[in-house]
Image: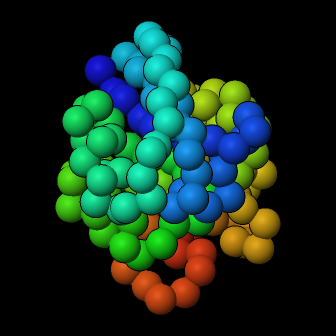
Amino acid sequence: MKRVAFSLWNGRIAPVFDVARHILIVSAEEGCETGRLERRFSSDNPQERALRLASMQVGQLVCGAISRSAADALEQSGIQIVSFVSGDAELVIQAWLNDHLGDAHLAMPGCGRNQRIRRRKSSKTGCTMQRKE
């Protein structure tokens, strides 16, 4: 079973994970959703957020922009990051279930077209994604 957390703001993917308060955790098996759980972060501390997600057995986070400190804390906890995603939460969840998170219409504005979001890489600049091949 896979568990992925989506950072939320008003029914959409939160533009910045570091200040997002709400997360939706979706469980799935073989591309089919098996459950949902809504939670709220009470802390902005990157390590506490990473520990909380890890304690809920989240293996992946789908979010908008994310700071280096938050990304490092999550990756140290074994959580894969799919960043610079935007859009309606339900559409993004369906894209995740169908392995289409890299579709250009889900990329944050300004993050480029024809790029597939894999996971955040170590870089000091904004949109850090690997190109689609």
Q: Establish if 2 lies above or below 60.
A: above
On the question of residue 5 being in view, the answer is: yes
Question: Residue extending furthest top?
Answer: 34
Please provide percent x and percent y for residue 66.
51, 66
Seen at 30% across and 42% down, the residue is 52
Seen at 52% across and 75% down, the residue is 128
Q: Establish if 114 lies above or below 59.
A: below
Please provide percent x and percent y for residue 22.
56, 39
Quadrant position of residue 126: bottom right
Asked whether 116 or 20 is in front, the reply is 20
Asked whether 65 or 102 is in front, the reply is 65
Question: Residue extending furthest front?
Answer: 42
Image position of 104 (left or right of 117) = right
On the question of residue 99 being in view, the answer is: no
Asked whether 40 or 110 is in front, the reply is 40
Q: Establish if 81 lies above or below 129.
A: above
Image position of 132 (left or right of 59) = right
Seen at 25% across and 41% down, the residue is 54
Quadrant position of residue 58: top left
Please provide percent x and percent y for residue 62.
51, 47
Seen at 68% across and 35% down, the residue is 89
Image position of 47 (left or right of 103) = left
Quadrant position of residue 131: bottom right
